[in-house]
Amino acid sequence: MQEATDPIDAPRASSLDLSADKIHVWRGDRHVLRGAGFAVKAGELLHVAGPNGTGKTTLLRVVCGLLRPEQGAVSWCGRPIDAIRAEYQAAMAYASHEAALKSDLSALENLRYSVGLKRRVGDHELRDTLGRTGVAACADLPARVLSAGQRRRVAMARVLAMRAPLWLLDEPFTNLDSKGTALMCRMLEAHLDGGGLALVVAHHALALARPIRRLELGE
Amino acid sequence: MSIGAFPAMRLILRRELRLYFRRPDQLLQPLVFFLIVTTLFPLALSPRLSLLRDMAPGVLWVAALLSSLLSLETLFKADAEDGTLEQLALSGQSLGVIVIAKTLAHWLVSGVALVAMSPLVATALAIPTDAFPVMFASLALGTLTLSWLGAIGAGLTVGLRRGSVLLSLIVLPLAMPLLIFGASATDRAIGGESPAGALYFLGALCVFTTSLAPVAAAAALRITLE
């Protein structure tokens, strides 16, 4: 099994930064996010932690622009993300807590039709990327027959293939075996080394060989 | 940097068509429904040619409307359920581009297929072959307009668990003019009169929905994605 060890392609620019300021979100009567805020620079990872139901996923959805907060704003390189939607989305790779694959399409087709919308990409390169996350053999199988762990690895390959400087990952370790978890950590390290940024929602500690910033929600 | 809007549309269109053809049941159900409903009428009513010919345009159009609705519910819902709609929405392409590509794909597999099948049904309903060209044109314009109207409805109901009833309640009233002008165009062609007036109206409705529905459906999707 070929695995990801080589650094990923992320822009070397050190001027990238992502910040959120006093984010407030209500869901009906529930005040889910009460003034959450952070700032992340190139090469940094923010670990969003907290018990279930404290708004970790909600925060991630706000940061990726799917959810508009009632108060507060998210800025990418100093500009509000609403004003630079297309540019921001091109610089971002989002992986939700579900693998988000079409079960009737093969792993390769899934990547072709999602990564392909972000940038021109050939099948050869996508197969390569699937190989780096250890699912090269599944490239032509419909996603329906893949195990949960394999689907997660395909979703990882999608994040890699997007070559985006900003990664927004929601529980990326779910369903992964120990080798997969280690691979994910190496991918994150390589991404950060290459000058990328990452926001990772996970309810357990991240085993990275570098200091990690932590945002604890629900305190 | 993202790829342009047209390559993106082409890519989504290919994705949609591939998905439709991987699920032939989804593709065939509305068509079989159309076929069965329209052939039930000659069986239920008396097979008198003059009676059938009088009823044919109405039967044809009501069946086309209902069969198109059948497949509209899944237009965005399937993608919303497996999370791929979020991926599409964050792909750097505008939601309008996504809506246009998905709706065109829906029309290709429902509307165009329905037009292709209409001679079969028309024969069962004793529509003379002279009226076929007008029937094709009116059905093609009508089903495209329906797909656009349906995209708005599907966008609004995508987050609801039992959205199909609401979808019909939203779309069917909006589709009334289609039914009136579509049936009247076919009726006039059967009677040997000029169908031009009704066809122009269908054309105008089609242009109107083609230009406005993507904006409306994209706005509806944006709300439901939150």
Image: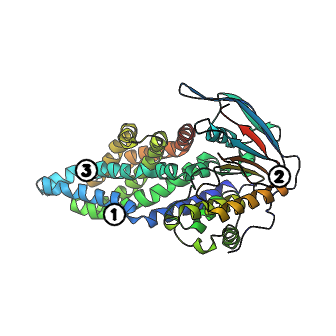
Chain of the residue on which disc 1 is drawn:
B
Mark 2 — residue?
A210
Q: Secondary structure at mark 3?
A: helix
Q: Is residue A116 visible?
A: no
Q: Is residue A80 above or below residue B138?
A: above
Q: Is there any visible trace of residue B183 in the rendered image?
A: yes
Please report the residue visible at 12 percent of the width from the left and 57 percent of the height from the top. Answer: B47
- Identify which residue, A170 or A179, lies in the foreground: A179
Amino acid marked by disc 1? Met
- Name which residue type carries label 2: Arg
In terms of secondary structure, where does tag 1 sit? helix
- Helix, strand or loop status at disc 2: loop
Given contact means CB atoms under 8 Å apart, are the residues at marks 2 and 1 in contact?
no
Query: Residue B170, labelled with which disc?
Result: none
Residue A53 position in % (x across, y down): 58, 36
Please tell me if label 1 and label 3 are on a single chain: yes
